[in-house]
Image (tube, rainbow, N blue to C red):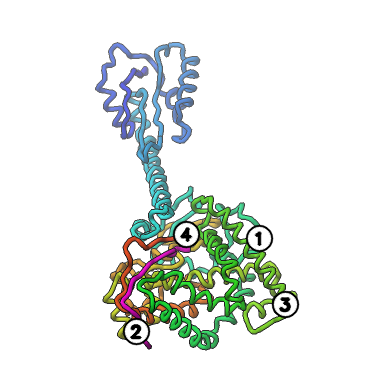
């Protein structure tokens, strides 16, 4: 039996072919009818949707024309082209094969169309995820990234970069990933990081057994006994800093309060002369950009961060050479002794570990104090509560860490097939775990966007969780508690100077660069 092909109308549409077929039946067919065999059309055009392109259809038509000379006026058969244009899905119908062709193919094309819609939804979601992630890294987001975190959290987990990266943003999922013993830190294990440079890494990027071995050595400097012994020194330094601002009508919170405390504690811990801090502080600040993860969003400043690493290494090589002949009670001396034994700590590991302690040992705590002071300035009722009850110091430090995390995210790598909130994650997938977003998750913290010094949020994720829980968490809490309690109780009527708040460019190691405060004096102890 002869069927007919018509020159149809050309129209962009979003409709399965049997709907287009109905439209085609309404077209005038009297003058344009050309005999054709449905078998030929079906066999030639029943190709996978992904392969059904303009060139494919033209090739089919040319072949049909050669095989069936009677088909002389055939310009197009049928062609459905999935195209991603502004995240919308368009199906372009060039010409329509009618009647039996549409009836036979309806189910197949419906299935193809449904699959294409799912594919388009997935790709559109990935595009949305990458767009939102780019917004998180944008400079104008630095003062307040939390609306972006909220948007990411409502869609978490988010698959992006073609499935090579999954963004984890709510509290329960972040806990699951951070505590999973199969998850790793080495970027080279991910598909995104396969070209990550080989070098001795810090504890941040190591996995067991090397991570376990080095962490065990370093952790001896952060035992509860050591932290208790450091309390008098911490409070003495805080008192000195508070007294130094008494004679000033205004002061910069960062350079005159938040930074000096952890710097002096860190220098004492490592045995670094305080007067030499200025020699490596600029390089330490620049190195902080390496935590912005070039694997996620490319940043030209990361090349400078690598240069900063080399500067710090050179400083340490010189310092270690000086210390070898004059070992003391400090952590650096103990690590040198271990390294000289030859089998536990290599020179590369010693250098990388000290670089981490030099950077993280002061900058994250300075950010904690500065973020906490800002929150107290913006919430005077909470400042009054803390001033009236110094015992809330630790709780206030934890709330500052939860409310405005000094480290915004960490990277983890899946090494097995796993599932997070119904999302399948394959080995080699990088997972961006948004600690700052998890800490504002209303499913875990009621009224999560409110700063509450009495909340007692000790289960926040600002220190991460699992095997990579921050080694110096107790020390950071102690410094933060002392500084925030003293600021609330002793600085009279502090006011943030409008326009003085400036943030550094760091996305991950996010911190305030400058913040000027006026006050009405300082209370004596």
- x then y, percent, for residue 110: 35, 37
Mark number displayed over residue 324: 3
Question: Is 395 left, or right, of 342 in this rendering?
Answer: left
> Can you see residue 64?
yes
In three-dimensional space, the C-alpha distance between marks 2 and 3, rounded to whole angstroms, equals: 45 Å
Residue plotted at (40% across, 48% down): 131
> Which numbered disc, 3 or 4, marks the residue that appears first in the sequence?
3
Instruction: Say what secondary structure mark 2 lies in.
Output: loop
Per the image, label 3 sits on a secondary structure element best described as helix
272 left or right, relative to 519 = right
Residue identifier under label 1: 199
Label 3 – label 4 distance at C-alpha: 35 Å
Nearest the viewer among 99 and 303 is: 303
Q: Which residue is mark 4?
A: 506
Q: Residues within 10 Å of mark 1 (few under 14, many from 20)?
A: few
Q: Tell us which disc is closer to us: 2 or 3.
A: 2
Is residue 240 within the magenta segment? no
Q: Quadrant of the C terminus?
A: bottom left
- Front residue of 206/5: it is 206
Task: Tell me whether circle 2 and circle 1 mark residues in contact (CB < 8 Å).
Answer: no
Seen at 37% across and 67% down, the residue is: 516
Q: Which of the two labelled residues, at mark 2 and mark 1, occupies the earlier sequence position?
A: 1
Q: Find out whether the residues at labels 2 and 3 contact each other: C-beta distance under 8 Å.
A: no
What residue did someone put label 2 on? Answer: 523
**Mark 1 vs mark 3: which is more N-terminal?**
1
- Residue at (70%, 70%) from the top-left corner? 346
Q: Secondary structure at mark 1?
A: loop
């Amino acid at each position: 039996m002869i069927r007919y092909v018509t020159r149809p109308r050309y129209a962009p549409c979003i409709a399965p072919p049997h709907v287009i077929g109905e439209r085609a039946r309404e077209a005038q067919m009297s003058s344009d009818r050309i005999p054709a065999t449905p078998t030929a059309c079906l066999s030639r055009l029943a190709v996978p949707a992904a392969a059904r392109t303009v060139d494919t259809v033209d090739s089919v038509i040319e072949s049909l024309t050669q095989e069936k000379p009677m088909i002389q006026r055939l310009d197009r058969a049928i062609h459905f082209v999935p195209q991603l244009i502004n995240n919308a899905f368009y199906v372009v119908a060039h010409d329509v094969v009618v009647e039996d062709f549409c009836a036979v193919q309806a189910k197949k094309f419906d299935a193809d169309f449904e699959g294409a819609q799912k594919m388009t939804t997935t790709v559109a979601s990935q595009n949305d995820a990458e767009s939102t992630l780019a917004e998180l890294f944008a400079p104008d987001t630095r003062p307040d990234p939390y609306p972006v975190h909220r948007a990411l959290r409502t869609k978490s987990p988010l698959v992006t970069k073609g499935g090579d990266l999954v963004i984890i943003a709510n509290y329960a999922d972040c806990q699951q990933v951070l505590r999973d013993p199969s998850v790793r830190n080495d970027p080279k294990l991910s598909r995104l990081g396969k070209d990550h440079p080989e070098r001795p890494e810090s504890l941040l990027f190591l996995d067991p057994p090397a991570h376990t071995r080095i962490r065990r050595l370093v952790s001896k400097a952060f035992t509860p006994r050591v932290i208790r012994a450091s309390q008098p020194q911490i409070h003495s330094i805080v008192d000195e800093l508070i007294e130094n601002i008494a004679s000033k009508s205004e002061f910069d919170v960062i350079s005159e309060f938040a930074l000096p405390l952890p710097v002096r504690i860190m220098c004492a811990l490592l045995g670094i002369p305080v007067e030499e801090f200025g020699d490596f502080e600029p390089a330490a600040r620049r190195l902080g950009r390496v935590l912005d993860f070039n694997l996620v969003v490319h940043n030209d400043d990361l090349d400078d961060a690598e240069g900063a690493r080399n500067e710090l290494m050179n400083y340490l090589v010189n310092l270690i050479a000086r210390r070898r002949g004059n070992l003391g009670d400090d952590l650096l001396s103990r690590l040198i002794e271990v390294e000289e034994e030859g089998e536990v700590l290599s020179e590369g590991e010693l250098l990388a570990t000290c670089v981490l302690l030099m950077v993280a040992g002061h900058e994250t705590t300075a950010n904690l104090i500065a973020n906490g002071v800002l929150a107290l300035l913006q919430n005077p009722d909470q400042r009054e509560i803390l001033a009236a009850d110094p015992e809330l110091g630790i709780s206030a430090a934890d709330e500052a860490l939860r409310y405005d995390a000094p480290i915004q995210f960490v990277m983890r790598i899946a090494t097995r097939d796993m599932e997070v909130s119904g999302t399948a994650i394959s080995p080699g997938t990088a997972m961006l775990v948004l600690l700052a977003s998890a800490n504002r998750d209303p499913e875990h913290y009621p009224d999560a966007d409110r700063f509450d010094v009495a909340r007692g949020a000790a289960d926040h994720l600002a220190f991460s969780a699992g095997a990579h829980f921050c080694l110096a968490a107790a020390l950071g809490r102690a410094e933060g508690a002392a500084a925030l309690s003293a600021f609330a109780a002793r600085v009279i009527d502090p006011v943030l100077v409008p326009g003085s708040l400036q943030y550094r460019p760091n996305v991950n190691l996010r911190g305030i660069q400058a913040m000027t405060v006026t006050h009405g004096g300082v209370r004596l102890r």
